[in-house]
Image (cartoon, rainbow, N blue to C red):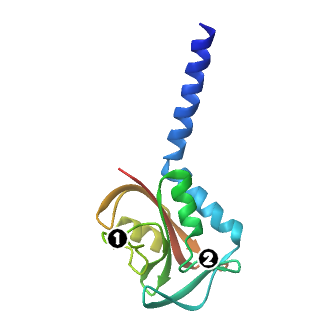
């Protein structure tokens, strides 16, 4: 009887940690935490991403454009897609992502669709809910990335495939 109780408690603990691992709000908090540990976000010059010239997004001294360590770490830890966008004019452009195109390439250089997530991050607010990313349905969260002056300079995204 005691062994069954121990096994049941262990199963509940595994189940709870799995549920937490697939919680979009917990996953976006992990992504944003990893980025903030690197340093404060800022724009410094421009950079080429998938043949397009876009603002160069830095966290501390690390340029995020074309750097995939953080987003790949989110995939490994949470089995989630992750992207960092830079704001260019009215658009948000993927500069670091583990989201793949139908051709199997990273979706860098593509833009955030004009959807509920776009509306929220443009206003400096979080969006969490269902979303379509390059043709696939996800439970997602997006957070605005703001510079030291509070200006929206980008966005972070995570998604758990539905």
Picture coordinates of residue 145, whole percent (x, y): 56, 72
Mark 1, mark 2: which one is toward the viewer?
1
Residue 150 is labelled as: 2
User: Compared to 5, does 75 lie above or below?
Assistant: below
Q: Is 35 displayed left or right of 116 in the figure?
A: right
Picture coordinates of residue 92, whole percent (x, y): 44, 78
Residue under numbered circle 1: 101
User: Compared to 60, does 56 lie above or below?
Assistant: below
Q: Earlier in the sequence, mark 1 or mark 2?
A: 1
Q: Quadrant of residue 159?
A: bottom left
Q: How many marks?
A: 2
Q: For mark 2, does the 10 Å Cα neighbourhood hold few (<14), some (14 to 19), or many (20 or more) residues? A: few
Please give the name of the residue rendered at 70% of the width and 66% of the height, measured from the top-left corner.
37
Q: Looking at the figure, which quarter contains the N terminus?
A: top right
Picture coordinates of residue 18, whole percent (x, y): 52, 40
Please give the name of the residue rendered at 30% of the width and 69% of the height, measured from the top-left corner.
102
Q: Quadrant of residue 6?
A: top right
Compute the Cα span from label 1 to label 2: 32 Å
Q: Determine the residue located farthest toward the top in the rendered image.
A: 1
Q: Secondary structure at mark 1?
A: loop
Please give the name of the residue rendered at 43% of the width and 85% of the height, measured from the top-left corner.
50
Q: Is 70 displayed left or right of 80 in the figure?
A: right
């Amino acid at each position: 009887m005691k062994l069954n109780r121990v096994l049941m408690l262990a199963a509940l603990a595994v189940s709870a940690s799995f549920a937490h691992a697939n919680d979009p709000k917990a996953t976006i908090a992990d992504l944003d935490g990893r980025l903030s540990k690197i340093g404060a976000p800022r724009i410094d010059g421009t950079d080429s991403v998938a043949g397009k010239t876009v603002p160069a997004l830095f966290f501390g001294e690390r340029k995020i454009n074309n750097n995939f360590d953080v987003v790949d770490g989110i995939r490994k830890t949470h089995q989630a897609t992750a992207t960092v966008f830079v704001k260019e004019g009215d658009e948000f452009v993927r500069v670091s992502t583990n989201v793949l195109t139908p051709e199997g390439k990273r979706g860098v250089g593509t833009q955030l669709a004009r959807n509920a997530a776009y509306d929220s991050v443009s206003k400096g607010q979080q969006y969490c809910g269902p979303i379509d990313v390059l043709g696939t349905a996800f439970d997602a969260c997006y957070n605005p990335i703001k510079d030291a002056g509070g200006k929206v300079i980008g966005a972070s995204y995570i998604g758990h495939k539905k």
